[in-house]
Image (cartoon, rainbow, N blue to C red):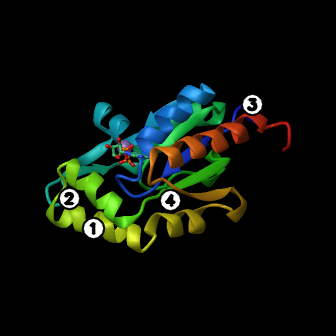
Amino acid sequence: MRSKPNVIVTGTPGTGKTKTSAALAEATHLRHINIGDLVRDKKLHHGWDEHLQCHIINEDLVCDELEEIMEEGGNIVDHNGCDFFPERWFDRVVVLQTENSILYDRLAKRGYSGAKLTNNIECEIFQVVLEEADDSYREEIVVAMKNDSVDDMNRNVAAITEWVTSWGSTT
Ligand code: ADP
Ligand code: MN
């Protein structure tokens, strides 16, 4: 049994995973692990996807890399998918959701266009990541949170922090 919980913050790109995870790490003193950064820094990929303009993640290498610290506990994993991680790693699966027009503006501002922008907007409309979370984890640990505004984010971070703080005393 780990002494601190592991949380995954997931959602379509642009829903605010990294911003939320950083604020959550500051509030809880858990370790923020940005999978995109890890993949790039440790080269845990099969190369670059020219069409989607992103690395093709080597999921086995990512899981091997993280196994030890996930067993230890106290991690916030920040990634746009959640289905390739071992189910046993996580105590809470947070799926961030953002209203379409707001998400569109965030992604456009990030420089996304064409297929990359359209794919991500569709991903959000069809709730692809929420469905993936529901298919991969127990219903009781999956929570969807609206993240349209800074107020939303502060509320979400406060709620998750409270959950982290009480973890272990109730389970
Ligand atoms: P992700 O990691 O899911 O791709 P980011 O955390 O990088 O998303 O956020 C994407 C953009 O949206 C950033 O410019 C960030 O500052 C902004 N953003 C994220 N969350 C909020 C929020 N709750 N309110 C306003 N802007 C936000
Ligand atoms: Mn991010």
Q: Secondary structure at mark 1?
A: helix
Question: Label 3 belongs to which residue?
Answer: 3
Question: Label 1 belongs to which residue?
Answer: 119
Q: Is residue 35 above or below residue 128?
A: above
Name the residue located 72 percent from the left edge and 42 percent from the top edge. Answer: 163
Q: Quadrant of the C terminus?
A: top right
Q: Looking at the picture, which amino acid does disc 1 mark?
A: Asn
- Residue 22 lies, in percent from the top left, at 47, 33
- Residue 61 lies, in percent from the top left, at 41, 42
Q: Label 3 neighbourhood size at 10 Å, few (<14), some (14-19), many (20+)?
A: few
Q: Quadrant of residue 70?
A: top right
Q: Earlier in the sequence, mark 4 or mark 1?
A: 4
Q: Looking at the picture, which amino acid does disc 2 mark?
A: Leu
C-beta proximity under 8 Å, tags 2 and 1: yes
- Calculate the distance from the C-alpha at mark 3 to the C-alpha at mark 2: 39 Å
Question: Label 4 belongs to which residue?
Answer: 83
Q: Nearer the viewer, residue 105 or 26?
A: 105
Q: Earlier in the sequence, mark 2 or mark 1?
A: 2
- Residue 3 lies, in percent from the top left, at 74, 30
Left-right relation of 166 to 118: right
Q: Looking at the picture, which amino acid does disc 4 mark?
A: Asp
Q: Label 1 neighbourhood size at 10 Å, few (<14), some (14-19), many (20+)?
A: some
Task: State ligand 2's quadrant.
Answer: top left
- Residue 158 lies, in percent from the top left, at 63, 39
Left-right relation of 53 to 37: left
Of marks 2 and 4, the one in the foreground: 2
Q: Nearer the viewer, residue 97 or 36?
A: 97
Residue 8 seen in this snapshot:
yes
- Label 4 within 8 A of ligand 1 by Cβ: no
Question: Label 2 belongs to which residue?
Answer: 52
